[in-house]
Amino acid sequence: MPKTLFWRLAMLLLVALGVAVLAMTLLFRQDRASLIARNFTEAKLMQVEALRNTLTHLATDERGNRPSGGLQKIGREYGVLLVPVDRRPEIGRLPSGLTLHPLIEKLQEQLGRDTEVRVGMRMDQPIVWIRLNVDVDASKGVWAGIPIRNIDAGEVPMRLLLTVGGILAVLLTGTLWFARRLSKPLADLADAVDKVAVGKRPDPLPEDGPTEIARVASNVNRMAANLERMERDRSTMLAGISHDIRTPLTRLRLASEISVSDAQSRAEMATDIDEIDRIVTQFLDFARGNPKEQPIRVDLRESLRAIADKAHGRGLSVEWSAGDTAICVNAFPAAFDRMLMNLIENAHRYGKPPVELALRRDGATAEIDVLDAGEGVALADVERLKQPFVRGDQARGGTMGAGLGLALVERLAQWHGGSFDLLPRTTGGTIARLRLPLA
């Protein structure tokens, strides 16, 4: 069974069309048999009876020696075809169906119960063959072929072909047009919902057609407009939050540098302020629905080298060695940097060094692994840890965090058309794996 509504409707209508054509063909065959039966009026039966009497009253020896031309002469006089039985014991075929049974009964009643009736074609013209027993010797009988005169040769098959072909072409065109017209609003609706599902604004749907489809289209248009308005409001709110929170954090940082004399206390306050700023940044990054930058083609060897150097600058050691083969992807630069830095920070915060960065190509995708030597993550906890605001047991101690790091990484990976997963390391620890499509 096809999956699309268009082809399901088309198949349904085509089946109905096939049934209609089959029924029409059967009716035509029935009508042709009825036409043959109607040709045998009482006058035609009397003509057959007179023909039999003519052949019967001929002298036996004269009839037996009569050349075929004599039979042809009698046949022309009566407008029939005459064939001696001894020359053609079998001719035509037995009639099928019930339509000709009344005719056979009538002929046998008129000519005798041993009268045989066959039907055949001669030059595309239907012929009814009647065996006339005109002698005591059955082998001396004659087949009398009576043409159905009011059906011209070749007219029936060509008429059937043209009629059925014309009807089939018209109905097929109408079927496909009807199925396409009925399924197009639903196809447009499915395309619009697909765009909404990935955060895009679809073009307004036409609100015409059947009542049910028009109502759904109207609701989808209203939903898309509401989502766009919410996206604008969220962008405005995030810009305000970023400004309103970071401004006092900057004042706190300046105040701690000026007013706190103890170096250790000053360093602890600066660390706490940086952690608060990092958490706020994670909240804002996670709340953004779509990237605000354009993707560019990057060589992962160069990008990962720059990220490793940046991590070293923050005191996060990373073991990294670039390969010889270039592996390129389309990436959002800031989002890609945030994604890898989150994984490196998590590896240091919740795992144990050494932290390694590995890159390889797997078919049409690039695999980026961030490996640590910590206690590892249970497979049963992987999906839970990728949910927002969920933290592992190792993170419930004194380490600050909002539980958005891995959830943010998964969202950023989806922005890139890829995936993110956590895997256990055979030697102990965790593998944080990113799979991105190659450019």
Image: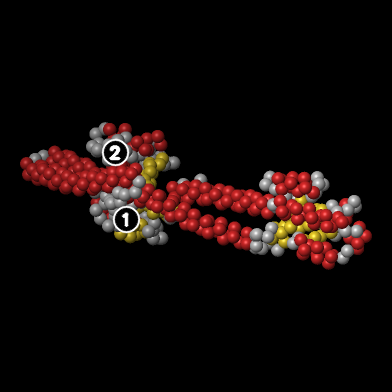
Q: Position of residue 250 (x, y in %)?
A: 12, 45
Q: Is residue 61 left or right of residue 433?
A: right
Q: Residue at x 74, y 52 (%)?
A: 45
**Amino acid type of the residue tagged 1 in the rendering:** Ala
Can residue 106 be seen here? The reply is: yes
Q: Residue at x 80, y 63 (%)?
A: 74
CA gap, disc 1 to disc 2?
A: 23 Å
Q: Residue furthest left?
A: 259
**Amino acid type of the residue tagged 2 in the rendering:** Pro
Q: Position of residue 426 (x, y in %)?
A: 44, 41
Residue that numbered label 1 is attached to:
331
* For marks 1 and 2 on the same chain, the one whose residue lies earlier in the sequence: 1
Camera-nearest residue between 407 and 239: 239
Q: Quadrant of residue 407?
A: top left
Q: Residue at x 68, y 60 (%)?
A: 149
Secondary element at image label 1:
strand
Vertical order, 144 against 193 (above or below): below
Secondary element at image label 2:
loop
Q: Position of residue 98 (x, y in %)?
A: 68, 45
Badge number at residue 388: 2
Q: Residue furthest right?
A: 61
Is the residue under label 2 in contact with that under label 1 (CB below 8 Å)? no
Q: Quadrant of residue 378?
A: top left
Q: How many marks?
A: 2
Q: Is residue 409 left or right of residue 1?
A: left
Camera-nearest residue between 82 and 300: 82
